[in-house]
Amino acid sequence: MGKQKKMAKYFLVLIFTAILSITFTGSSTSAEEEPKAQKPSLTGTWQVESATLEGQAFPKEVTGTMTLRMRGGRYEAHVGGQIDRGSYKVNETTSPMQMDIQGIEGVNKGTTFLAIYDWQEEKLRICYSVEEGKRPKKFEATQPGHFLVVYSREKK
């Protein structure tokens, strides 16, 4: 499998499952329970600005085909013509904040991804682990099994 196809497959797997149902130990909040006063909100459509897997940046030809829609604890990820759906939960009491994602439909069906995330104005940064049961500690994708994606909110 070519490097681009392998990166696209990892991205599909991560993006689709990283936004799925999350089970946290301790206090957690689903997207449905997010405080209305919280700005910004995860709800909306996000375009991929950049994506890096294990130190390798995805080319613009790939990232340009990727979008992520989040609403009410559910997500839908598009990579090219492929769609992945699932659920997610967040834990905002930790630093960095945590996200647990579980794929329900598509290539990541039955897969749970542990991630960390933060906000940078209208940008959302998520660092996923593709290794089962492991969560990244830093926002970097130089470690094996780490996938870092920077999203920007789609303007209407």
Image (tube, rainbow, N blue to C red):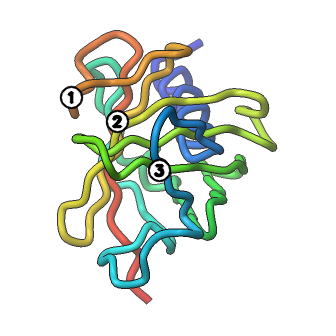
Q: Position of residue 22 (x, y in %)?
A: 59, 40
Q: Position of residue 18 (x, y in %)?
A: 54, 39
Task: Assign the C terminus to one quadrant of the image.
Answer: bottom left
Q: Amino acid at mark 1?
A: Lys
The residue carrying mark 1 is 138
Badge 3 crowding class, 10 Å Cα cut-off, few under 14, some 14 to 19, many 20 or more, is many
Q: CA distance from mark 1 to mark 3?
A: 17 Å
Q: Secondary structure at mark 2?
A: strand
Q: Nearer the viewer, residue 89 or 140?
A: 89
The residue carrying mark 3 is 90
* Up-down relation of residue 26 to residue 121 (above or below): above
Q: Secondary structure at mark 1?
A: loop
Q: Nearer the viewer, residue 127 or 149?
A: 127
Q: Nearer the viewer, residue 144 or 100?
A: 100
Q: Choose top left, top right, bottom left or bottom right for residue 94.
A: top left
Q: Residue at x 35, y 10 (%)?
A: 144
Q: Amino acid at mark 2?
A: Cys
Q: Position of residue 64 (x, y in %)?
A: 44, 55
Q: Does any portion of residue 23 appear in the rendered image?
A: yes
Task: Assign the N terminus to one quadrant of the image.
Answer: top right
Q: Residue at x 60, y 31 (%)?
A: 13
Which residue of the protein is positioned furthest toward the bottom in this rendering? 156
Determine contact: label 1, label 2, CB under 8 Å.
yes
Sequence-first disc among 2 and 3 = 3
Q: Position of residue 7 (x, y in %)?
A: 48, 26
Looking at the rendered image, the disc whose residue lies closer to the viewer, 1 or 3, is 3
Determine contact: label 1, label 3, CB under 8 Å.
no
The residue carrying mark 2 is 127
Sequence-first disc among 1 and 2 = 2
